[in-house]
Structures are given as C-alpha cells and as structure tokens.
Amino acid sequence: MERKRGNQTVFFNNKPKIIGYYSIVGPKEGKGPLRNYFSEIEEKDDFFGQKTYEKAERVMIERALDGAIKSANVKYTDVHLFMAGDLLNQIISSSYAARSFDIPYVGVFGACSTMAESLALSACLVDGGHFDTIACATSSHFSTAERQFRFPLELGNQRPPTSQWTVTGSGADIVSIKGNGPRITCATFGKVTDYGINDVNNMGAAMAPAAMNTLLAHFKDANTSPRDYDLILSGDLGKLGSEILIDLMEDHGYKLGLNYKDCGQIIFKRNQNVLMGGSGCGCSATVFNSIIMKKLMTGELKKVLLMATGALLSTTSTQQGDTVPGIAHAVVIEGEKNE
Amino acid sequence: MERKRGNQTVFFNNKPKIIGYYSIVGPKEGKGPLRNYFSEIEEKDDFFGQKTYEKAERVMIERALDGAIKSANVKYTDVHLFMAGDLLNQIISSSYAARSFDIPYVGVFGACSTMAESLALSACLVDGGHFDTIACATSSHFSTAERQFRFPLELGNQRPPTSQWTVTGSGADIVSIKGNGPRITCATFGKVTDYGINDVNNMGAAMAPAAMNTLLAHFKDANTSPRDYDLILSGDLGKLGSEILIDLMEDHGYKLGLNYKDCGQIIFKRNQNVLMGGSGCGCSATVFNSIIMKKLMTGELKKVLLMATGALLSTTSTQQGDTVPGIAHAVVIEGEKNE
C-alpha cells in the first residue's frame, strides 16, 4: 500500500498503538488538578529516595518505563527499543535510566517537544515493521532544570512574571503493532523557528511561532481544521504562549476554540504559584499519560492532536547572545472506539 | 515482504542509499593522513570565521549539510527531514544549524555514536517509506568539548596519557530511496553498557564493552563473523579502547584481524600529539564521510560495518560519582558494485 504523505506529515498504514502508558510526578504536581489521574505520585519530596535531584529524575524515568511496560501487560523481552530524551546536559536522565534495562536504546533531543518527537519516531519505526514494540519516555525535574538553566535554588531568586514552572515528572508509552489501545494515525515533524526572542524567561513566546508553523503544516497536510479534533493539546506554551499561538493562528485564518488546551495550564492550579504555568519535557508527558490517555481509552476523547513544543537553547547559546529557536512536533492519536 | 529482524538488528528491504556525503575539518585534522580525502579543510584556524568556538561548530554542520546536499545533486526541497546531534549541551550545534534550513528537524543524542545512530534511524525511516530523502549530520569541536567537559584551554592543563583528542569536524550524509550510492543494508541498535569505569580521561575503556556487546549482537543477528566484512570500523575507541575491544572479542571467540580499524587511530598521525587518538562525534563522521565513502564508491571497499561508540556521561554525572555508561550503534554499508 502506498503511503500517504504531506510536506511535513507522515500517515501510518499499520496503526501503531499505544498499548501501555504511565505517569509519575512529584508532590507539587500531585497536589494539582490531575491528582486522580497520575499513575504514581511521590508525596514526600522530590528526591524520590535519592541523594541528588539528578538521580531522582533518573529514577522517575525508570519507574515510568517499568510502569508502562506493566500497564501494557508485556514482558521486558517484548520491548525491542527504548527511545528517550530529557533536558539535562547529554540527556543523562534518559541514558542512565536506560542502563537499568536490557533493551537497545536510542537517545533523542527535542527539549520539551521530546514526548511528541519520540512518539512520532516510534510510530514510524513500528509502522515500518522495523520494531514490533517500542518504549518511549521523557522527564523533567524542577530542581535539576533550575540549577542547570537558571540559578541554584539556594539563591532564592525571584521569578519573572513570564516564567513557567518546570514540571517534576516523567511519562512513558509503549507503542506496538500488537495489542490494543489508541492508535497513532499520523505525525507532523516541525521545523526550527526563531522569531528573535532572547528572553530566556519567556519560553512560551519563543515556542509559539514554532507551534503555529507545525499546526499550519499539519492542517494543510492532513486537510483538516481545528474543529476536526476533539482536543488540540500543546505541550507547555503556558498562558502567554498559548495566547500568542491563538492570535498567530487567527492571523492565518484558523480559530482555536474551546477544544484547544495547553498542558502547562492544565497541570497546576492557579494558586500554586507557577506564574504562566507548567513547562518541561515532563509537562506534556505526564498530562498526556494521565487524563488524556484515560479519556482516549474510555472513548470520551476520540481524536487528539498532541503537539509538544521545545525551546532549543542552552546556557551557552544564551551567554553568547543567541536568540531562542523553537520547535514543535505533533502526533494524532485516535481512540479505540473511533472506527 | 516480511522483514528480517534479529534481537537488536533490523534488515532493510528497500535498500536505502547514501547518495551524498560531505566532511569538513579543522586545520589540525587537515594536516593528518586523510588530508586528501576530506571534502573541505579550514586551514586558517578553528574559528571558521566566527567569534566563538560554539558558533564555529554550528557553521561546520551548516557547511557539511550544504555540501552533502550538493554532492547528492538534489535540491533542498527534496530533503524531507534533517536528523542531527552533537556533544554540546542541548545539542545546540545541531539545532542552531537546523535553524538555517527550511527542513523538518529531529534532534538525536548518542554522544560519539551519533553518526551511526542517525544513519541507522534515517535508514529505517527511508526503508519504511516514511521519507524519501533524509539528511543526517553530526559534529564535534576540540575547543568546545574541552571547555565544556574538561578545562578551559587557557588553563593549559596537562593531558593524561589515556586521553584522546576531540576531532574538530562535521560529517553529513544524504540517505535516500532514490538515486545511486552505497546501500545501508542493516542496522544494529546497541544497549547501554557500563563496566564501572569512572576515569573521564579514559573514554576508550568506558566504551569498549558497549562496542563488544553491539558487535556480538550484530554477528549473531546477521549470522556473520568478522571475516565477512572488508572493514569493521569503530568510531573513536582510540588505541587503548581498540586493544580492549580486540581482547574482549577474542574472549568471545571472535578474532578482529587486519580488517578492523578505529577512526580515532586513522584520523591523526602519531606525531600530532593526540595520545590515544581522535574522538568526538566528528571523528567517525569525518573519517566515514571521506576515505571510507570514497572507497565504497570506487568499489575498493564492498562491505563496511561502521560502529560508532558513545560515552553517555555529563560533567554532572561525573561530579556525582557516577561511572561512565557506553553505547554503540552499527550500520552495514555495502558498495554499489557488491551486487
């Protein structure tokens, strides 16, 4: 069967499915509105029993992968590839977590777009028949991100009003040709987009143009419009970034209505002191792998466009005066009952 | 057609081909034994006309991608995906280079295994019919790596005898279902392997066990032995790492003979003060995309196993007492004339 393809979108003939999923979060996320949806909440503190935050982040990925494999009701030996990435330098959370598993490993990096990137690539590899079953995962941790990208927490720096709060959490999915679960029907790969934002405390604004580009490419390639989806879910644009995206899309003739949500605005309550909302790879990973997957499983949601955005900067690029390029990758997931 | 697969190896039915390639290196590499094989040598200094080494590394990737596309004799609009990664935090060399091109971009990270990782993934995506033509690239730069991973050059630190010299260079390939060129016939995805090495100046020893694991998996999956290849080429194990790999393989009953080489030992002359040899993502990328590709094109080499190895550490993991996990991915490339 010839494969349908758009400029940036690939359509899957063989219906790769998400047969297992898991989300694990820290105490703050566990007090948020999605409390009852997460697979696991660490109530005590965000050390997850480890001596450092970096080791804690690693443990989250290990538990997420472990939980996703159990939830898929498959064996470790049935999983043929583990694809993961995270925000830490040299994606150590993912690579050290991969060390604990006897599964071939591929590291990816898309900053906070990693969940969608790894789902998109995994779906291609499963659809192409190269692998039957792939696990993908990502994570972020407030305390590792703050000290790597901004300031040591001990300094007690004040946070600018446009800043977001990095989610402490990890999400994992098992993508397979076998078994049952919501299907990944297509994936849109994003282009790097830079509108010249150089405020590293305003990631939403830096990523919104990339989100717009990917949405426009997706609607064109799939010949759809926003109303064709039960839910269009961006990763972590936050309040300001989402508003910018809505405006940008309107300029292009697309109205994002009530079916558009942003994970960064769903995961925390307003009174949790998170300013523009949640961010980090773990934001879309844990929101998708909790309430969204649950609603896809029950049929409450039938067709979801998950578009995770990433800001592709480092502290070095910022120090050298570079602006912040963004990227957004998108996957469409359709519920089992949407035949 | 049913796809042949091994435990860690996928075999390609549709013959993804390397239809274009390019290598660019700095002055030191340009004075080495492969001088006449590189596509481009920057003779002046390793700034490549930029103000910082990091921006220089980015320019190398841009030129490599540009050169590879020209060498493939295709247009930019024919390339549907750009897959790249590098050693810098948040792979900024790749992401900022991707900003210059109007091509969907996927970031990957496998430390110095990135050239093989991106070739392997690209071959899957082309073989599966998801993309017709993919560009993949990677880079490293001595001066960016030294100041990020070790010490600022200005300190003039002495280098331990087991250390290697990070190659300043970038290599790019165009993998396509159309056109002519050496075929990628299979890929073996490696597992993270950690033998407990904690000496960050001895990457060869840290990566050799991962190389062994991937070679063993490959020979088993493909039902081959070392003598079935004209060349088995490891990425950057260096002198010590290569010797360890030869010993480890002998323990498992495989004799790596004269057809085994390591890019890290090919790229520099002994008198270039590089101790154990070259290293970095750019090492295998520039060696493969110069002398090796040239010999595959002429038919002098008919079947090459390119296995690039990566050390998956960061400065943070080292500071927190972690040992160094390694990984190795392998691809088999067969010359056009090997029908």
Image: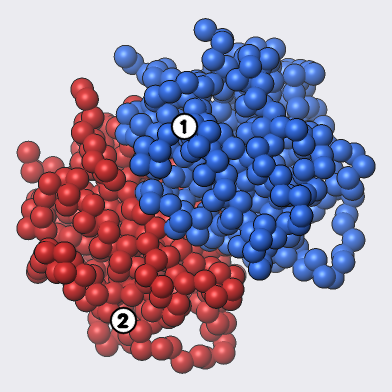
Chain colours: A red, B blue
- Residue B104 located left or right of residue B109: left
As drawn, the label of residue A276 is 2
Q: Residue at the spot x=36%, y=42% of the render? A: B77
Q: Classify the position of the N terminus of chain B by image quarter.
A: top left
- Residue B142 located left or right of residue B275: left
Disc 2 is placed on an element classified as loop
Q: Position of residue A36 (x, y in %)?
A: 23, 67
Distance CA(mark 1)–CA(mark 2): 47 Å
Which chain hosts label 2? A
Q: Which residue matches tag 1?
A: B73
Q: Quadrant of residue B323?
A: bottom right
Above or below: residue B290 compared with residue A35: above
Decide: few, some or many residues near mark 2? Use Cα within 10 Å; few <14, some 14-19, many ≥20. many
Q: Position of residue A165 (x, y in %)?
A: 38, 78
Q: Quadrant of residue B91?
A: bottom right
Q: Nearer the viewer, mark 1 or mark 2?
A: 1
